């Protein structure tokens, strides 16, 4: 498998990681349910009663998935490193875009985000890039705020414009 | 007879100019959603749901359901012209549709696909028209135990019928239930599983999950392949359409069979995707020219498309009459009903006659409008595909963010959406099915409520789920569905004892 030209994390590793992650989530659910109370109270089954069994089912199911995952190794790759880099090149800027939204609002963030994506990932000319990255937020503003009266987050720039 | 009068009243509602306009807008948006990679029916409807908050519920559901029909139609366009299934249920359409297009018969393939979609949907709507009132009458006898049994059946069918490993289906589904449980407990009013985070007070909204899991996750999957995206041309003219229509009736047997498969798979919540594969597989086995399947056989387009649409449409029957959606998109529509203050279930047919029959009438009209729109506008929609992914992808991401934000006007939700997106990418790569996860988030609270109420009535004895004929039958069906793959295996072993 290591002789292959493409390299990347093995599918098996991710499969095991996923099963463990889901298992831990199940444990968290069980823990939270225990805190809420899983027995019968004066008003019948208490708040943690149902989620407790759900958590238990998650743990059991992921234990079986874990067993399946570590048993078979078909040498498949989860993805090549290059592919993962592509994926991360979307995830990271999106995270920044989303994280900055409470501060600079949606419109400015979207302009920068679209422009970044088209210019650096897509390799478009500045003219095309600017046309789309400005046009889309403006269109969004007209459709959402004007036509359908759905308010979207705004930052200092929109305030300055008086929108 | 009363139903017929109701239906005509429904047509009158759906035929108001405002509603017809929404229908056309919905279909067009839906086809665009279906054509674009990364925007599926479920998250497309989820993103556009907030736009309908200011509309009357009947108009809103007409528009949203038309988006759904449009997305079903749109999936076929990309499958046939570019061998890219825009939607999971159109994967089976690529098997014969794309070869047909390559042999210079894209017009025939598209006409066959659209027409069979229409036939499948029409069959399902007629079925809904006839059966819905019966189901509703029947459902009036439902207590909490019966309700829980229906949920049980729905979720067991997922485990038994999906092609993913059963324990992965269970894990995904249970995660959905757990996420639904977070926040205020509806019966005791107690907080649970929030671990002190105030944002989680109201739990996880499934719309956020849908937009993240299906929208962002899909974009990330597409990004793996880079930004390369091929475009192409499509011509369709009246002569080809008429010629194909003349040919289609010879395949009536395939159509009818696919309709039945689709309706069955739609009502039991297996959904459109398995329905299309199953129908394709059976058609391949039974057709006279079955050996030619995969090389551009028109029957290989008719079978999956008919079944996918029949399933997609009939998925709305359990949603309306029992409150159990048959597909993720139906689940989003169900969420819409709840937001507009309509409680799906048997009482909907009694209390909201105008709404229900308006919706059913709009299914007839919406599909007809859809057929006309797609047949006349294929070149336009194909042109959208020529817009490179480098432009489409950031726009879709922004749209997803807008959709996630406007559900509760909360930026926390937008971050949550991204988390769900990465999770969706990983889950999909590891073969965990997403549909049961989403349905569990939607139905989790209701299932739990039914479960606890029935236990309350029986002082904690599980015997309540087998206490009368009705509930025992549903529970037994659920158990059969749960162990369906094991039963099938055992049966085939019995038939070939030496193997």
Image: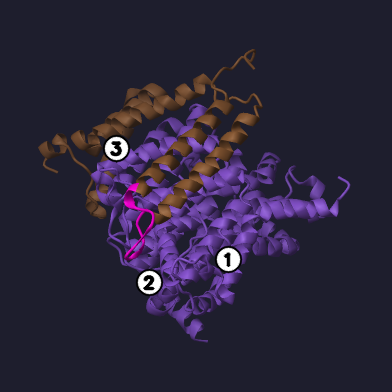
Chain colours: A brown, B purple
Up-down relation of residue B209 to residue B221 (above or below)? below
On screen, residue B70 versus residue B94, left or right, reads left
Q: Quadrant of the C terminus of chain A?
A: top left
Q: Residue at x 38, y 76 (%)?
A: B352
CA separation in Å, label 1 and label 2: 43 Å
Span shown in magenta: A35-48
Evaluate if marks 1 and 3 touch, with contact meaning CB atoms under 8 Å apart. no
Label 2 CA crowd tier, 10 Å (few <14, some 14–19, many 20+): few
Tags 1 and 3 on a common chain: no
Which residue position holds label 2? B16
* Residue farthest toward the right in the current orientation of the protein: B498
Tags 3 and 2 on a common chain: no
Which residue position holds label 1? B475
Up-down relation of residue B86 to residue A47 (above or below)? above
Report if residue A58 lies within the magenta region.
no
Q: Residue at x 62, y 60 (%)?
A: B479
Which residue position holds label 3? A135
Label 1 CA crowd tier, 10 Å (few <14, some 14–19, many 20+): many
Output the chain of dot 2: B
Toward which corner of the image does residue B52 lie, by quadrant?
A: bottom left
């Amino acid at each position: 498998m290591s002789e292959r030209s493409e390299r990347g994390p093995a599918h098996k590793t991710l499969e095991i990681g996923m099963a463990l992650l889901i298992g831990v989530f199940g444990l968290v659910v069980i823990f939270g349910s225990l805190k809420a109370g899983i027995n019968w109270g004066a008003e019948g089954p208490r708040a943690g009663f149902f989620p407790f069994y759900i958590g238990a089912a998650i743990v059991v199911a992921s234990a079986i998935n874990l067993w399946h995952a570590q048993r078979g190794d078909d040498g498949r790759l989860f993805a090549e490193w290059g592919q993962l880099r592509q994926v991360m090149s979307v995830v990271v800027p999106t995270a920044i875009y989303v994280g900055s939204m409470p501060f600079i609002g949606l419109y400015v963030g979207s302009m920068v985000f679209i422009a970044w994506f088209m210019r650096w990932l897509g390799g478009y000319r500045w003219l095309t890039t600017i046309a789309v990255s400005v046009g889309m937020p403006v269109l969004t503003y007209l459709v959402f705020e004007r036509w359908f009266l759905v308010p979207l987050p705004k930052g200092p720039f929109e305030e300055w414009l008086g929108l | 007879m009363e139903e017929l009068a109701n239906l005509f009243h429904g047509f009158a509602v759906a035929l108001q100019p405002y509603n017809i306009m929404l229908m056309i807008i919905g279909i067009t948006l839906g086809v665009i959603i279906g054509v674009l990679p990364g925007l599926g029916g479920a998250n497309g409807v989820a993103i556009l749901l907030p736009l309908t908050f200011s509309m009357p519920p009947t108009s809103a559901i007409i528009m949203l359901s038309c988006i759904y029909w449009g997305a079903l139609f749109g999936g076929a366009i990309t499958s046939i012209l570019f061998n890219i299934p825009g939607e999971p249920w159109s994967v089976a359409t690529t098997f014969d549709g794309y070869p047909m297009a390559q042999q210079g018969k894209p017009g025939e393939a598209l006409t066959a696909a659209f027409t069979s979609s229409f036939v499948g949907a029409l069959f399902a709507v007629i079925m809904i028209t006839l059966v819905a009132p019966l189901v509703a009458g029947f459902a009036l006898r439902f207590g909490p135990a019966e309700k829980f049994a229906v949920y049980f059946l729905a979720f067991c069918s997922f485990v038994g019928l999906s092609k993913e490993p059963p324990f992965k289906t269970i894990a995904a589904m249970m995660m959905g239930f757990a996420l639904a449980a977070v926040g205020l407990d509806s019966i005791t009013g107690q907080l649970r599983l929030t671990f002190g985070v105030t944002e989680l007070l109201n739990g996880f909204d499934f719309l956020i999950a849908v937009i993240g899991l299906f929208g962002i996750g899909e974009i990330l999957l597409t990004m793996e392949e880079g930004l390369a995206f091929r475009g192409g041309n499509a011509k369709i003219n009246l002569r080809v359409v008429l010629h194909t229509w003349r040919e289609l009736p010879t395949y009536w047997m395939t159509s009818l069979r696919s309709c039945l498969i689709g309706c069955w798979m739609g009502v039991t919540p297996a959904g459109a995707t398995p329905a299309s594969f199953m129908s394709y597989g059976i058609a391949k086995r039974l057709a006279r020219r079955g050996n030619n399947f995969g090389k551009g056989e028109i029957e290989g387009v008719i079978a999956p498309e008919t079944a996918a649409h029949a399933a997609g449409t009939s998925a709305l029957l359990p949603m309306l009459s029992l409150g159990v959606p048959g597909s993720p998109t139906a689940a989003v529509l169900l969420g819409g009903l709840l937001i507009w203050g309509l409680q799906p279930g048997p009482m909907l047919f009694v209390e909201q006659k105008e709404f229900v029959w308006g919706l059913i009438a709009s299914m007839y009209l919406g599909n007809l409008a859809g057929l006309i729109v797609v047949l006349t506008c294929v070149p336009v929609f194909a042109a959208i595909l020529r817009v490179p992914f480098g432009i489409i992808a950031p726009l879709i991401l922004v749209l997803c963010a807008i959709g996630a934000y406007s559900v509760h006007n909360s930026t926390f939700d937008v971050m949550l959406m991204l988390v769900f997106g990465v999770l969706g990418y990983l889950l999909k790569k590891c073969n965990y099915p997403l549909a049961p996860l989403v349905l569990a988030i939607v139905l989790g609270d209701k299932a739990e409520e039914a479960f606890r109420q029935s236990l309350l009535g029986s002082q904690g004895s599980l015997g309540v789920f087998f206490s009368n004929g009705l509930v025992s039958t549903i529970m037994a069906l659920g158990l059969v569905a749960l162990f369906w793959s094991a039963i099938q295996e055992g049966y085939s072993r019995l038939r070939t004892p030496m193997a």
